[in-house]
Amino acid sequence: MKEKVEMQSMKISGHTDRQGSRSYNLKLSEARAMVVKKALVDAGVETNILTYGYGFSKPIDDRDSADAWEKNRRTEIEFIKVVDKGSLIKEINTIMKN
């Protein structure tokens, strides 16, 4: 983020599909969250960043299909206690355009 957006912290959650063992998917989801954290830190984000790996415990699509598996392989970012939400939205929109 080029502009400093004041917030308490960011929560990055990694998720996987149901393929593979529970222990493998937990490690994979943790690794996904850590990759995003590293990219944000390398980009200069200066806030507390918490990471969590949930494996396949929180699917967004319960079906047993390739489409569902693809949707469930994801990383989510939650912004916690943002002071100026307008600045955050502007920064996210700028990043998404690049």
Image: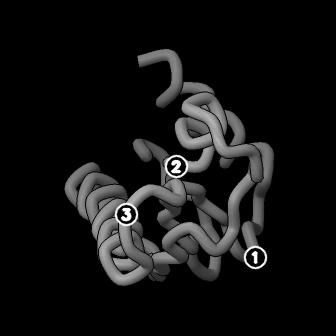
For residue 38, the mark is none
Q: What separation in Å lies between label 2 and label 3 (alpha carbons)?
A: 16 Å
Give the class, few, some or many, for how many residues have Cα within 10 Å of label 2's Cα (few <14, many ≥20): some
Figure coloring: one colour
How many callouts does the rendering have?
3
Q: Which residue is mark 2?
A: 74
| Front in this rendered view, residue 96 or 64 | 64
Label ID, residue 20? 3
Q: Amino acid at mark 2?
A: Arg
Compare marks 2 and 3 and give the one earlier in the sequence: 3
Which residue is at 41% across, 42% downward?
2
Q: Earlier in the sequence, mark 1 or mark 2?
A: 2
Q: Secondary structure at mark 1?
A: strand
Taking the image as shown, residue 62 lies to the left or right of residue 55, namely: right
Q: CA distance from mark 1 to mark 2?
A: 23 Å
Depth-wise, is mark 1 or mark 3 nearer the camera?
3
Q: Position of residue 19 (x, y in %)?
A: 44, 56
Element under disc 2? strand
Identify the amino acid type marked 1. Lys
Q: Which residue is mark 1?
A: 81
Horizontal and vertical percent position of residue 96: 52, 25
- Please, is residue 64 above or below residue 76 in the view? above
Task: Please say if 93 is above or below 35.
Answer: above
Depth order, front residue of 14/59: 59
Question: Label 1 to label 3, Cα distance in Å?
Answer: 36 Å
Residue 48 lies in quadrant: bottom left
Between disc 1 and disc 3, whose residue precedes? 3
The residue depicted at 27 percent of the width and 59 percent of the height is: 35
Q: Residue at x 52, y 54 (%)?
A: 17
Amino acid type of the residue that numbered disc 3 sits on in the rendered structure: Gly
